[in-house]
Image (cartoon, rainbow, N blue to C red):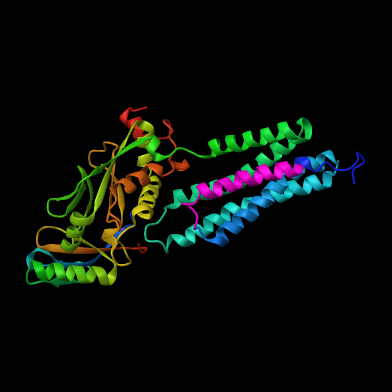
Amino acid sequence: MADAPTPVMFAIITTDKEAVYGGMSPIFLAHDDLERDRLAMWLTRITNCIAHDLHNGTVVLTVNQSGS
Amino acid sequence: MSPSGPIDWSPMIIGFIAGFVSRVISIRSGRSHYPGYPSGYISQIALAIIAAIIGSSIIVALVGKQFTAATFLTLAATQFRDVRATERTTLEKEENLILVSRGAGYIEGIAITYEARNYLAMLVALVTSIGVQYLGVIIGSIIGIAAIIVGEIYMSGPHMGDMVDVEPAQIHFEKGSLLYVGDVMMMEVGLPHSRERYEKEGIGVLITPKGPRGQAALWNVSQRQAISHEVASAVGAQKDVGYPEQTPLCRMDMPKGSGRAALSILPVEHDVQAAIRAVKMTPVLESGKWSAIRSPILNRKGLN
């Protein structure tokens, strides 16, 4: 617990389709920032993952490997 | 029956009382570490009685030339080794059930203290009963009281307040989503909703070490986890399963490496003074003890 376990990319939510390419996690497309934040919030609460804003229209959700 | 006449019970009785008192005192001061349930107290009191009896009866057994009894008593004393493992297992199991975990270092510290308390009770009982046996009841009782006081002073280790200064600081966000306490960067909060919560309700404190020793303690991750746990139990944490970004955090001033730390928490009770008190009252963990030779950070920075 003391040190953060290695996070795994869980999902990517973006309004900018061009900014994200490929990868092993699902990519959710949002129409605008509000929609993106709403999606991020829902997925965070559902899956216990952590939202990180990359400030290019993309929010990534990471989840810690061994629970939290 | 010993050949030297009837047994003199007074060393055993006074030694027992002294050992028992020495253990019972620490039940009170250990309140924040152990759940305050009656069953928890009873098992501690039972151990206290056993430890005090063992400590106080050895000298009586030896004087009565009952060497078999004395040997058995030392055997019984070794049984207290299990106490530490039991305590550690309990706390480790609990770790997954509490929202702000104690951290492995803190658990080990509690377990060691728990075990040592029983041995201390045994020692106090032994010293007192020796005193009563050879110096009389009155001087023996005085020795017992002195042993209790010395034990208390010796066992109450340093607190973070001895080594660090704690001051309240403002929580704010930079670059849109980076949570700062004062000028210390804590983490990245992606959700606008959580950012609002932190700005409105969060409290932050800055922890500045008074010297290299305090800094070494702060660099220890277990130590900071223990601080988070203590603060969360003092002011509460608005957190539940599924809200990972609302976990109380204690982080170093990292890209700069200035040795200062900061703590951010979403409290249930918005009481900055209580949070500061909790930081100061956090015990300094043994694993975080200062060693100039072993600490790579202090060596590198030439602080020692």
Q: Work out whether residue B272 or residue B138 is closer to the camera in this orientation and state it.
A: B138
Instruction: Note whether B139 is above or below B217 in the view shown.
Output: above
Q: Nearer the viewer, residue A9 or B102?
A: B102
Query: Is residue B122 at least partly visible in the picture?
Result: no
| x 68%, y 47%: residue | B52
Please, what is the dominant secondary structure of the magenta stretch? helix
Where residue B152 sits, quadrant-wise, is top right
Residue that extends furthest to the right in the rendered view of this protein: B3
Residue segment shown in magenta: B12-35
Residue B223 visible: yes
Task: In this rendered view, identify the residue nearer to me: B78 or B117.
Answer: B117
Judging depth in this view, the residue of B124 and B241 nearest the camera is: B124
Quarter of the view holding residue B166: top left
Q: Is residue B217 left or right of residue B127?
A: left
Snapshot quadrant of residue B70? top right
Image x and y of residue B93, in percent: 48, 62
Note whether B143 is above or below A67 in the view shown.
above
* Residue B304 x, y percent position in the rendering: 37, 27
Q: Magenta segment: does it hold B32?
A: yes
Q: Is residue B250 magenta?
A: no
Which quarter of the figure is the N terminus of chain A placed in? bottom left
Q: Is residue B47 left or right of residue B155?
A: right
Q: Report the side of B225 relative to B7 (left or right).
A: left
**Quadrant location, the C terminus of chain A:** bottom left
Q: At which x and y percent is residue B14?
A: 72, 41
| Image location (x, y in percent) of residue B242 | 30, 67
Q: Residue drawn 26% across and 38% down?
A: B257
Q: Residue A2 vs residue B49: left or right?
A: left
